[in-house]
Image (cartoon, helix red, strand yellow):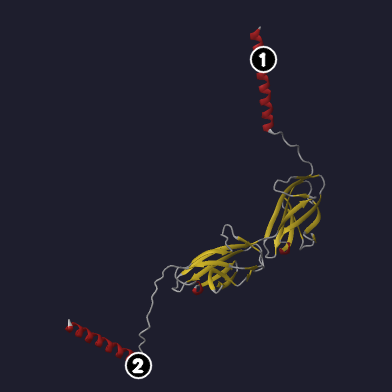
Amino acid sequence: MKMKLQSLRKELLALGILLLVTGVLAPVAGIDLLSLATIIYDATPPSIGTTYPAGTSGAPTGLTPGASVPITAVVTDAVTSYGSLNVKVAVTWSGGSSGDLQMVPEVVGGIYQKHYLATTWNLPNLPNTLFTFTFKAWDQAGNLGTKTTYGVTGRPTGDFYVNGQKVTADSVIYLNSPSLSFKVTVTAMADYVNDVIVTVTKGSNTATLSYSGSQLTKSGSDYTCSYSLAWGEGSYTITSQIKDTANQFYTLSVLTMSFGDIPPTPPNPLKFVNLLTVAGAVLCVYAEKNRVKELLK
């Protein structure tokens, strides 16, 4: 037992001398014994959740031309801390791009949140334009998560009136005078109307009336003019359109109207068949009553 203790003391003494020498010589040799490398294996990209805008290609988020848009996204990652994620968004549209916009994490009480937001971005002053928002998030391992959403700016629209009558999809107008009054009332985004056009067509003949051509006059959101049908009696097609500030055209309505003698409306064959049915039923009832009388005699 005594010999075992002596042997253990010798081993401990040797180990102590070794550690002492190593501790003295390591700094001289430039060796940092406390430097330990931690390796984290991460092959999962960050997840991008709720965003604004959030629209799909089939149902884009409605936006206002020239307005400021607060672009936001909720980003999560199982390994990388929220403050260390690199999140960007790029906005593209036909003929233009915002480039990459850096998104920074929201900080509440000194704690990074999952909610990322970009510096407020101003939309181009373009009506009826589809915008694509591509969100990108990198973690510290270089994994990339993406998400794409869509937004669209509105467009001007309005109503068309002929002789004070609002034109709808089923409008039928008959005239016995060639004199007409036209009015287009802009009901949405009047500031984005560049021109209003009314086109009158009969066969190969066409007359174009427009605000830019001074045939229509403007008062508030109304564009009006008078016109006289110039090519005699018959069927005319009248088309009303709006042109926006991006030179895009929108048709408000297409009206076919008749001027002059109108042939009488032909009888409805279904009504004639209904009359025959009623008459036949009356005759059958009358005949049956007479048969019953004969049997009772």
- In the image: residue 60, left or right of residue 225: left
Q: Is residue 296 above or below residue 278?
A: above
The residue closer to the viewer here, 28 or 155, is 28
Dot 1 falls on a residue whose secondary structure is: helix
Q: Earlier in the sequence, mark 2 or mark 1?
A: 2
Other-residue count near label 1 (Cα within 10 Å), few / some / many at <14 / 14–19 / ≥20: few
In front: label 2 or label 1:
2
In what quadrant of the picture does the C terminus appear? top right
Quarter location, residue 244: bottom right
Locate the N terminus by quadrant: bottom left
Name which residue lies at 69% across and 30% down: 272
Image coordinates of residue 12 in percent, x first then y, are: 25, 85
Residue designated by label 2: 28
- Badge 2, how many Cα within 10 Å: few under 14, some, many 20+? few
Residue 163 on image: x %, y %: 80, 50
Name the residue nearer the viewer: 102 or 281: 102
Q: Is label 2 in a helix, a strand or a loop?
A: helix
Q: Residue at x 68, y 58 (%)?
A: 250
Q: Which mark is residue 289?
A: 1
Query: Label 1 is placed on what type of residue?
Result: Lys
What is the number of the mark on residue 61?
none
Q: Amino acid at mark 2?
A: Val
Number of callouts in the render?
2
Of 221 and 29, nearer the camera is 29
